[in-house]
Image (cartoon, rainbow, N blue to C red):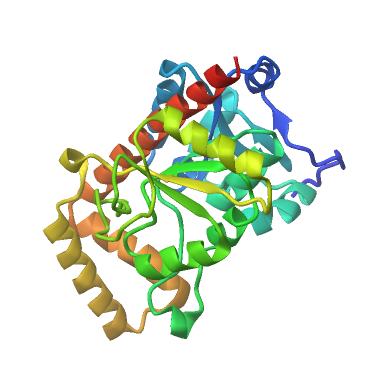
Amino acid sequence: MPQNTDTSYEPVLSAEVRAALAGGLPVVALESTIIAHGLPRPRNLKVAVELEGIVRSAGAVPATIAVLDGQAHVGLEKDQLERVAKDPAVRKLGHRDLAPALALGASGATTVSATAFLAARAGLRFFATGGLGGVHREWADSQDESADLRLLARTGITVVCAGVKSILDVPATLQRLETLGVGILGYGTDRFPGFYLSSSGLPVDWTAHSPEEVVEVVRAKEALGGPDAALIVANPVPEADQLDPALHDRVLAEALGVCRERGIAGQGVTPFLLEELMRRTEGASLEANLAAVRGNVRLAARIAAAAAAAVR
């Protein structure tokens, strides 16, 4: 593996992203793990291009983030995006993996934690993703908690998402976010979204009804100062696009039973549950996931555009 000879290790901004930031234009960060590891080929590249197009159609500039040959990139050129989508050697990088990846010349797609960190480091304020990681089921035994939570607790970025993955312990995750001081706004809802589902059934304390209201919350948060922490804008997947709730609950309950029978525990639980949902819903879970991501990307672009308009 070639080592990176550029010892600055600063993220490289694409020409488009650099010009947008210099000109006060809206920019939206996008993760690359969904491209490299979350979708089958060749659909993954089509979705990557589609998501960037959604950002542009709302008047903002997309900044897909990845690490290539030991260099962090904020905004990818066409050939770089294709490489992330097509190269099976591209690794999955969380925040803790960034330093060794940069130093050792690795290439990898960035998860929520790594994307949020690099986006904030580059001066981006808005980030769109599907669903966050969180506290895993049976945490008392496994102590398994996503790195997303602690990273968001110390990174002042606004994240538009469809809640946390429904296979997790959602009540425990919400409690953990409260403890860490991470703010949550429901977008057009007083219920916390359930990723594949429009609602997890759990309440949120605050609701925003427009991009402009979200921007005002961001402005107030920044004006107050204090510890850096993310603001989560929890945007539910439309009910027409959600996974059938009864099917979701039945498949999840049965898959958890299989985990217990087979002794699947710790880090093996999440990929098993996701695969079971995909297989036993005949791909419907993937379509709900993509519907959520599209809606989140569209909303993040509208919020970024409203923030830029407020400054002008």
The answer to which quarter of the image holds residue 188 is top left
Q: Is residue 265 visible?
A: yes
The answer to which quarter of the image holds residue 50 is top left
Residue 221 position within the rendered picture, expressed as x and y whole percent measured from the top left: 59, 43
Q: Is residue 262 left or right of residue 156?
A: left
- In the image, 265 versus 192, the foreground residue is 192
Q: Is residue 311 above or below residue 38?
A: above
Q: Quadrant of the C terminus?
A: top right
Residue 48 position within the rendered picture, expressed as x and y whole percent measured from the top left: 44, 31
Q: Is residue 84 visible?
A: no
Q: Is residue 211 left or right of residue 106?
A: left
Residue 151 position within the rendered picture, expressed as x and y whole percent measured from the top left: 61, 56
- In the image, 59 versus 73, the foreground residue is 59
| Residue drawn at x 46%, y 18% as measured from the top left | 56
Q: How many marks?
A: 0
Q: Is residue 307 left or right of residue 291?
A: right
| Residue drawn at x 68%, y 46% as measured from the top left | 225
| Residue drawn at x 58%, y 35% as measured from the top left | 219
Q: Residue furthest left?
A: 246
| Residue drawn at x 74%, y 55% as measured from the top left | 100
Residue 19 position within the rendered picture, expressed as x and y whole percent measured from the top left: 68, 16
- In the image, 236 versus 111, the foreground residue is 236
Q: Is residue 77 above or below residue 119?
A: above
